[in-house]
Each structure stands twice: as C-alpha cells, then as structure tokens.
Image (spheres, helix red, strand yellow):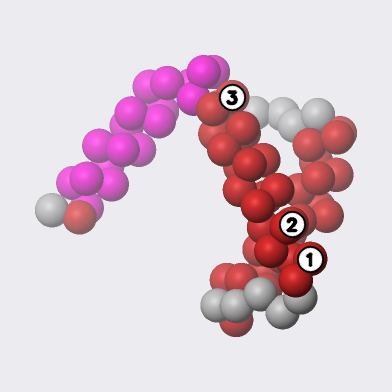
Amino acid sequence: MKLDSATFRQLRRLAPVLDDVLNANEIEYADQAVNLAALATLCAELFDAYQCLHPQAIEQARLDTSLESS
C-alpha cells in the first residue's frame, strides 16, 4: 500500500513517540500523550484503508494469529 506524502510525514513525526513507548514503556512528556492519540488514530485509519484493499490478507492474518495462540 503506497502512502500519500501527508500520511508519510505524519508517521515520521509520530515515530519517536511510538519508539519511546515501546522502548521505555512510558511517555516522557505530556505532549507525547497527545501525539500517541494521533498515532493511534492514524494507525486505525491506515488499517481500515488496507483492509478495504486487501480483506483476504487481513482475514488470513487473523486466522494465522488465532492458530498460533492455540
């Protein structure tokens, strides 16, 4: 899936927030919490767009995940 330039810029701006959360399990600055909400929204929008384009791939990933956790 090709990203438009505005979405790509948003992801680049929000990537350090995600990196902090994943590496430190915490948010260092209050404005990162706001950015984290924006990142969650953007990820949900990207997932929805991808699911519309590739519904079979999403379903297969869900099946694979459920089999792995069994």
Q: Identify the residue shown where x is 75% and y is 32%.
A: 3
Q: Does dot 2 land on a helix, a strand or a loop?
A: helix
Q: State the SS at label 1.
A: helix
Q: Residues within 10 Å of mark 3 (few under 14, many from 20)?
A: few
The answer to whether 1 is drawn above or below residue 38 in the figure is above
Q: Residues within 10 Å of mark 1 (few under 14, many from 20)?
A: few
- Disc 3/disc 1 C-alpha distance (Å): 27 Å
The magenta stretch spans residue 46: no
Q: Position of residue 33 (x, y in %)?
A: 69, 64
Circle 2 sits on which residue?
35
CB-based contact (under 8 Å), mark 2 and mark 1:
yes
Residue 13 in the figure: left or right of residue 38: right
In magenta, the rendered stretch is 51-68
Q: Main secondary structure of the magenta part?
A: helix
Q: Is residue 65 magenta?
A: yes
Q: Nearer the viewer, residue 38 or 14?
A: 38
Q: Position of residue 70 (x, y in %)?
A: 13, 53
Whether tag 2 and tag 3 are in contact, CB under 8 A, the answer is: no
Q: Identify which amino acid the numbered label 3 is placed on.
A: Ala
Q: Is residue 4 above or below residue 43?
A: above
Q: Name the residue at 64% across, 28% down.
A: 1
